Amino acid sequence: MLNGAGRFLPPLSLHTLLVALVTGGIIHIASTLAIPYMGAATAFDRVSAGLPLHTMRIMQPATPGNELLPFNDPAQQLAVCPFDLDDGLVTVTATLPDPGWSLAIYTSHGDNFYAVAAAGLRQPEVTLVLEPTKATLLNLFGIGTAPNFDPSRIQAPESRGLIVVRAPRHGQAFEERTAAMLARARCTSSPASG
């Protein structure tokens, strides 16, 4: 192969190609994972703006041009509660009466770390306690704390985040019932015990 000056260029070795491919992959993955931390305003900032901490609020239904977040599903009604575990533990209660209802918990960067959906054979009442992760140096390697065997206690990977209850919108005749069920959802803070 000749370059522009008419000199011979040696062919690229397989080793050089593999190094370039792996380096490109690492750069791609690192930049993809870093993007949520680099934005000026996160989804958490947009959703929680003007909402009090530890208070569940029913959001206005999404309409074209009036979505809280991009690609917000207009077929769902949301109740949202911003939380901060620096203020203490957070207790969440919600009713998930029918299929299509769900409760999900997100970090402030949008990572979904817990979700539960309504199911026919399960009690519709959900009660959870959010607590900070018990961090140790060994947690960096995926070891160091005993597994949590209490399904009602959820360890949050970050201190701030959002609790979201989703309800399907079945039409105007069901709007009042849906709003009443969403209004039952609560998230309250209490001091951490010992």
Image: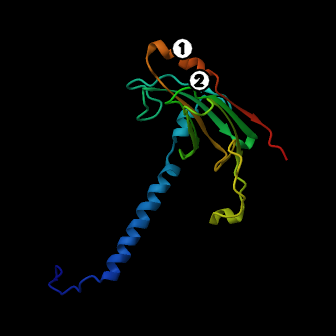
The colour mode here is: rainbow
Q: Which secondary structure lies at badge 2?
A: helix
> Is 15 drawn above or below residue 37 in the view shown?
below
The disc, 2 or 1, on the residue closer to the chain's N-terminal end is 1
Residue 20 image position (x, y, % from top left):
36, 74
- Distance CA(mark 2)–CA(mark 1): 10 Å
Residue 92 placement, left or right of 63: right
Q: Which secondary structure lies at badge 1?
A: helix
Q: Residue at x 54, y 14 (%)?
A: 176
Q: Is residue 53 at least partly visible in the picture?
A: no
- Residue under pointer 1: 176
- Residue under pointer 2: 182
Q: Quadrant of the N terminus?
A: bottom left
* Res 53 → quadrant: top right
Q: Residue at x 63, y 63 (%)?
A: 142
Residue 47 image position (x, y, % from top left):
54, 33
Which residue ends up furthest to the right in the rendered image? 194
Near-viewer residue (127 or 98): 98
Q: Residue at x 49, y 55 (%)?
A: 34
Near-viewer residue (66 or 154): 154
* Res 86 → quadrant: top right
Q: Mark on residue 66?
A: none
Report the number of numbered marks: 2
Q: Is residue 193 at least partly visible in the picture?
A: yes
- Mark 2 Cα-neighbour bin, 10 Å: few <14, some 14–19, many ≥20: many
Residue 105 image position (x, y, % from top left):
59, 40
Residue 85 placement, left or right of 73: right
Residue 157 image position (x, y, % from top left):
64, 50
Q: Amino acid at mark 1?
A: Glu
* Res 56 → quadrant: top right
Q: Residue at x 67, y 62 (%)?
A: 139
Q: Amino acid at mark 2?
A: Leu
